[in-house]
Image (tube, helix red, strand yellow):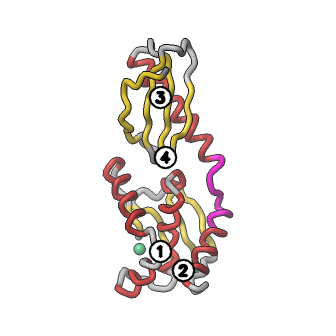
Amino acid sequence: MNANNDDSFQPIPGLGSGVEVRRSARRKRTISAHREGENVVISIPANLSKREESDAVREMVERMNKHDLKKKISDEDLEVRSLALGAKYFEGLALPRSVRWVSNMRERWGSCTPEDGSIRISDRVRLMPEYVLDYVLVHELAHLIEIGHNPAFYELENRYPERLRAEAYLEGWQAGHGHGESS
Ligand SMILES: [Zn+2]
């Protein structure tokens, strides 16, 4: 039986999701982690001290992050995905020449250079749900057609049906981690 000492999900920096620690009297030494939806559940022996618990949590989160980064979307996948989104929402009018992840974008979720058709996406988005990634891509793709944030731009962006849900996710993430917005 698992005893839930703390069942509140808390955001973990860099994970883009929450973590729940479950103490189990049956466990002697082993620590394990698995995903439940967007959250990570870490099971630990009931007799660990608070300090041992926080060390164990940090280690498991780092391990899962490395694992996720490996299996998550590559630059090439990102381009294919962008082309599919451009075809679906913009009748192929938004055709990026390159789309890639960047690790140095801290103030924004994505950026677009219409002159050369290049799009860069902050790798903080990499661990977020796919509907959020798609929203950030659609936003940048729309800039290939409309440079400014004007009514014509918002008409394009609004073609993405999960825009509001994705914006709410990003705002919530931002509140927990600092700044970042689509531009
Ligand atoms: Zn923008």
Q: Position of residue 48 (x, y in %)?
A: 45, 14
Q: Which residue is mark 1?
A: 160
Q: Residues within 10 Å of mark 3 (few under 14, many from 20)?
A: many
N-terminal of the pair, mark 3 or mark 1, is: 3
Q: Residues within 10 Å of mark 1 (few under 14, many from 20)?
A: some
Depth check: give the residue in front, 139 or 119.
139
Query: Helix or strand or loop: what does disc 1 sit on?
Result: loop
N-terminal of the pair, mark 1 or mark 2, is: 2
Q: Which residue is mark 2?
A: 89
Q: Quadrant of ligand 1?
A: bottom left
Q: What segment carries the magenta color? A: 70-79
Residue 161 lies in what quarter of the image? bottom left
Q: Gap between marks 2 and 4, in whole Å?
A: 27 Å
- Which of the two marks, 3 or 4, is nearer to us in this view? 4
N-terminal of the pair, mark 3 or mark 2, is: 3
- Which of the two marks, 3 or 1, is nearer to us in this view? 1
Q: Which residue is mark 4?
A: 38
Q: Which residue is mark 3?
A: 57
